[in-house]
Amino acid sequence: MLELRVPPAIVWLVCAVLMGLASRLASSLSISIPAPLTAGFIVLCVLSGCGLAWRALNAFYQAQTTTHPMHPDQASALVTDGIYRYTRNPMYLGMTLLLLAWALYLANWAALLGVALFMAYITRFQIIPEERALQRIFGEEYEAYRRSVRRWV
């Protein structure tokens, strides 16, 4: 029922808001990490997340295929080069890294649940339906790609 119904950006935003609420409600679960270390990890996650998403979108534009996450059945090309040689879902991985950066900024164990929630939801209700659509469209070519490249990392 929820498959391909909620845009990933909305799921991401809801998880980010829930993470903020969780960190306030569970303030006793705060993490004490040295500021320079936290700042370094946050910057690394933000730059990596944005870089992955940009490279993934750019690859789709170059292949002239759809970037609309709600309509994977409109894919006209199977993108397997560039960043897609390392992960089948660099856009979602990038979004996950941004949530991880947010969790680090919030410095709260409860906030990390939002990262797990995002990954679980996106896998079940976005990625798996996308994979079924790509299997129908590209058949054995997609199956070979799926066997050689991991879903997340």
Image (spheres, rainbow, N blue to C red):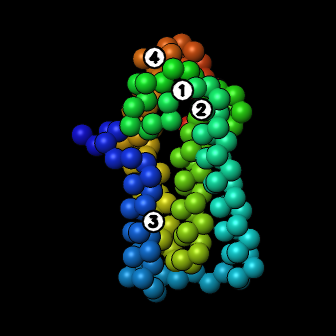
Q: Which badge, 4 or 3, comes first in the chain's sequence?
A: 3
**At 39% across and 69% down in the image, what residue appears?**
18
Q: How would you rate the neighbour count of disc 1 (Cα within 10 Å): few for under 14, some for 14-19, many for 20 or more?
A: some
How far, Cα to Cα, is label 2 from label 3? Answer: 26 Å
Q: Tell me the SS state at disc 4.
A: helix
Residue 8, position as x, y percentages in the image: 43, 48
Which numbered tag is attached to residue 16? 3
Q: Extreme bottom residue here?
A: 28
Residue bearing the label numbered 4 = 137
Which numbered tag is attached to residue 148? none
Q: How would you rate the neighbour count of disc 3 (Cα within 10 Å): few for under 14, some for 14-19, many for 20 or more?
A: many
Q: Tell me the SS state at disc 2.
A: helix
Residue bearing the label numbered 2 = 60
Pointer 1 with pointer 2, Cβ within 8 A: yes
- The amino acid at mark 3 is Ala
How far, Cα to Cα, is label 4 from label 3? Answer: 33 Å
Q: Which badge, 1 or 2, comes first in the chain's sequence?
A: 2
- The amino acid at mark 2 is Phe
Looking at the image, residue 108 lies above or below residue 129: below
How far, Cα to Cα, is label 1 from label 3? Answer: 29 Å
**At 68% across and 50% down in the image, what residue appears?**
51
Residue 16, position as x, y percentages in the image: 45, 65
How far, Cα to Cα, is label 1 from label 2? Answer: 6 Å
Looking at the image, residue 110 lies above or below residue 93: below
